[in-house]
């Protein structure tokens, strides 16, 4: 999220370096919030051109983000740059840190590389904890029922699993990134299988937002973009702040219509 | 217009099975055996009533099923009790297909299926009309479809407008002479010759099974024979022979099936659609609108490759007739000499010479490791079996299987490749069945680069070019496996950019021209 807390001017010029520098320097939590507050006015101006998409889409999100998340983000950004400097090219959001060349060439007139809301980690971690808890309960039941299974065995399985799972959540969040580019939406995600997807705006059939119960509690929303393709026909961006997901939905719709320009399937 | 009256007896015959079953139940069932003659009479009476009811229903179905070709839509009013009225705009009809099985052919009737883009099922099925009427409908719908499209184009509102403004925008001369009075020229693209039919039959078998058998048999057979007692031995040999017979039988069956299915295959270009006919018993005639074609792919299995034959499949958007659901790929050329198949594929989608780039050699190493692990895993299983049952004392010999690993890995690697053309991206993969998929840039939906943990270790990546077709068993997915990761990233950008370029080109050209082929 910090990656959007740049000056809109930077976004339209699209340079990675100024943004990267700015980001590393915004590790103190005051600056980003101030910038967020100042953004909505700019939004009205930059609504029309697709190149400004990210700026427009970014605003409502940053507007709703509270100081607390911003602080979390600043934290995340710091770890991020360390990660990228470590030479792992899988982190496409390395573009944000500025000191390691990104795996993919992010040219001019592209939006900032964006990540998910930090709160999505809570959701994923919840899933992991729940999963291991179920496993642990089964193991506990076995330990009670059968002699050879003992409590420490159960713990010896579940605790490493839990640690692995949480590590996976952390990595998954790290690796999730998306970007509104000139004529397509670019996404990268995946720990075991790292997937980069290019979804041209022309090909977007419709856009949904969906919110599960957990997501509602966390104030999150998932944006689902559908194409007519056979595989990867639907691309989901989880963990977006609800308000942002909706404005992004509208924005993507506009981009799709604009890109289509009267051209059929 | 009603259906053909001959459809009544045919439909009755179709339901005849269940009627006969009821009759059998009545005559030999408990009522007859316990109730004596009275019971039998009552039973027979009931059966007659049932028969009358079924006949009545079929007659009513026939009388209450009407279809009509209006200027803009194909109207169907149907239903005996609950009525249904459908108006299908011509522009939305993708295919008109005709199917005829032997009995239907005897009665000279045929089933007509109207396919639209949405859904996995036919939009409407006319069961059944006279065979000549079926052909007339096929032609007529195609003609009116073009007329409506031309009309819309001349009003320069795009084809969509014709559908949107349905009743009001009645094209001027459609009822009689449509705006486009030109009868589309039919040009035969391909006709399956006799020897090709036989090759098809011989080649169609699923060779993977035979391959597996051939690899395993020399290992297993002698070893098993040695250490088992004669009685069990006989059983095993018998089993093996039976298995072999079953395999050969399956092969023969699939060959015969293919011959029956593709007998008399013809592919004709007619205006802006391809039309094909095929089948010995179940005759089938369908159409593929050129504008719906997403991918063209060449499939060559091992045998066909040795003989120099290939088949051409076409992936379309939306529903493809005669295929199981979700499989939007249809055969354009069941089999032909490779050159002929290629030139035919080029007529459908004019791609240039194909020169394939292979993945880096370290990809091959990856397959060596993968197959090696598989073999070792199998040996491990054999060993475990030995420990558990004391049989299979020769299990360490399984390690010899490792000798197969390098050639297997090489074959896998050697059949991989991709080609980035001016207007198409082409991928190739598969040893048992080599698939070469041609995707024009303007049909690209999304582009994906993926790298698993293992691929990242070797700095490899897979590029997937997704189209609105694809999926299915014969898979027309364009997948370039295990490229250099950096190269894959570049291609990701390239394909995405060329898609935009191709779309811009298309917009610059007039709409009709861009959809015509050749």
Image (spheres, coloured by chain):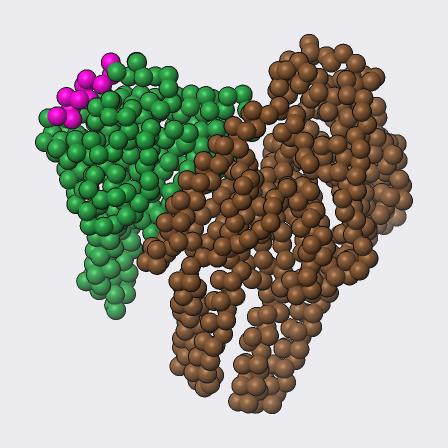
Residue at (80, 33) in percent of width and height: B185
Q: Is residue A112 visible?
A: yes
x and y, in percent, of residue B284 in the image: 77, 44
Query: What's drawn in magenta, residue-wise?
Result: A31-41
x and y, in percent, of residue B158 in the image: 62, 19
Residue at (17, 45) in percent of width and height: A82
Which image quadrant: the C terminus of chain A?
Answer: top right
Picture layout, residue B365 above or below residue A179: below
Q: Colour of chain A?
A: green
Picture layout, residue A143 above or below residue B452: below
Residue at (69, 59) in percent of width and height: B309
Name which quarter of the figure residue B2 lies in: top right
Q: Colour of chain B?
A: brown
Which image quadrant: the N terminus of chain A?
Answer: top left
Residue nearer the viewer, A131 or B255: B255
Q: Is residue A172 visible?
A: no
- Side of A244 relative to B213 (left or right): left
Q: Main secondary structure of the magenta part?
A: helix
């Amino acid at each position: 999220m910090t990656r959007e807390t740049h000056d809109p001017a930077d976004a339209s010029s699209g340079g990675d370096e100024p943004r990267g520098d700015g980001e590393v320097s915004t590790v103190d939590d005051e600056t980003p919030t101030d910038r967020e507050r100042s953004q909505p006015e700019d939004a009205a101006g930059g609504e029309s051109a697709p190149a400004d998409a990210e700026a427009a889409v970014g605003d409502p999100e940053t507007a709703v983000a509270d100081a607390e998340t911003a602080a979390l983000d600043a934290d995340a950004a710091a770890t991020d740059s360390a990660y990228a400097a470590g030479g792992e090219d899988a982190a496409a959001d390395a573009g944000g840190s500025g000191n390691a060349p990104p795996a993919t060439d992010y040219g001019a007139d592209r939006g900032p590389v964006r990540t998910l809301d930090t709160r999505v980690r809570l959701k994923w971690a919840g899933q992991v904890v729940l999963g291991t808890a179920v496993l642990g309960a089964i193991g506990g039941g076995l330990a009670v029922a059968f002699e050879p299974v003992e409590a420490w065995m159960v713990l010896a399985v579940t605790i490493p699993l839990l640690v692995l799972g949480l590590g996976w959540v952390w990595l998954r969040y790290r690796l999730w990134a998306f970007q509104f580019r000139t004529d397509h939406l670019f996404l990268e995600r995946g720990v075991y299988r790292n997937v980069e997807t290019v979804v041209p705006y022309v090909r977007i059939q419709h856009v949904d937002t969906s919110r599960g119960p957990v997501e509602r509690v966390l104030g999150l929303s998932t944006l689902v973009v559908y194409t007519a393709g056979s595989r990867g026909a639907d691309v989901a961006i989880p963990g977006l702040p609800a308000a942002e997901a909706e404005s992004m939905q509208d924005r993507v719709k506009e981009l799709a219509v604009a890109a289509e320009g009267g051209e059929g399937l | 217009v009603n259906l053909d009256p001959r459809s009544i007896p045919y439909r009755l015959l179709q339901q005849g099975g269940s009627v006969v079953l009821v009759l059998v139940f009545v005559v030999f069932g408990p009522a007859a055996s316990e109730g004596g003659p009275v019971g039998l009479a009552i039973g027979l009476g009931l059966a007659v009533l049932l028969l009358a009811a079924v006949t009545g229903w079929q007659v009513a179905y026939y009388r209450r099923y009407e279809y009509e070709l209006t200027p803009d839509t194909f109207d169907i009013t149907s239903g005996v009790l609950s009525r249904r009225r459908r108006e299908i705009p011509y522009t939305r009809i993708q295919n008109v297909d005709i199917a005829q099985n032997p009995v239907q052919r005897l009665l000279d009737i045929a089933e007509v299926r109207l396919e639209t883009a949405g859904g996995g099922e036919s939009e409407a099925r006319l069961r059944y009309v006279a065979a000549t009427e079926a052909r007339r409908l096929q032609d007529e719908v195609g003609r009116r479809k073009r007329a409506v499209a031309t009309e819309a184009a001349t009003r320069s509102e795009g084809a969509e407008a014709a559908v949107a403004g349905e009743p009001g925008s009645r094209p001027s001369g459609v009822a009689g002479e449509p705006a486009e009075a030109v009868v589309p020229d039919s040009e035969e693209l391909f006709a399956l010759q006799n020897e090709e039919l036989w090759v098809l039959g011989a080649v169609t078998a699923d060779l993977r099974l035979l391959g597996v058998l051939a690899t395993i048999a020399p290992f297993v057979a002698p070893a098993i024979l040695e250490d088992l007692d004669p009685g069990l031995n006989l059983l095993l040999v018998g089993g093996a022979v039976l298995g072999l017979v079953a395999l050969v039988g399956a092969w023969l069956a699939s060959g015969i099936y293919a011959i029956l299915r593709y007998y008399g295959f013809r592919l004709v270009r007619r205006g802006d659609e391809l039309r094909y006919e095929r089948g010995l018993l179940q005759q089938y005639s369908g159409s593929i609108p050129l504008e719906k074609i997403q991918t063209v792919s060449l499939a060559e299995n091992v045998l066909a490759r040795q003989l120099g034959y290939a088949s051409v499949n076409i992936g379309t958007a939306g529903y493809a007739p005669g295929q199981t659901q979700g499989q939007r790929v249809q055969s354009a050329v069941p089999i032909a000499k490779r050159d002929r198949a290629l030139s035919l594929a080029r007529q459908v989608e004019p791609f240039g010479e194909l020169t394939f780039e292979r993945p880096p050699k370290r990809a091959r190493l990856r397959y060596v490791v993968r197959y090696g692990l598989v073999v070792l895993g199998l040996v491990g299983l054999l060993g475990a079996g030995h420990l558990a049952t004391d049989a299979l004392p020769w299990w360490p010999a399984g390690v010899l299987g490792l000798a197969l690993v390098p050639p297997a890995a090489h074959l896998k690697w050697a059949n991989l490749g991709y080609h980035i053309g001016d207007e198409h991206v082409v991928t190739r993969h598969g040893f048992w069945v080599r698939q070469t998929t041609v995707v024009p840039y303007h049909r690209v939906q999304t582009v994906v680069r993926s790298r698993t943990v293992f691929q990242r270790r070797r700095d490899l990546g897979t590029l997937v070019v997704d189209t609105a077709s694809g999926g299915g068993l014969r898979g027309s997915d364009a997948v370039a496996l295990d490229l250099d990761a950096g190269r894959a990233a570049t291609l990701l950008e390239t394909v995405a950019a060329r898609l935009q370029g191709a779309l811009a080109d298309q917009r610059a050209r007039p709409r009709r021209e861009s959809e015509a082929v050749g």
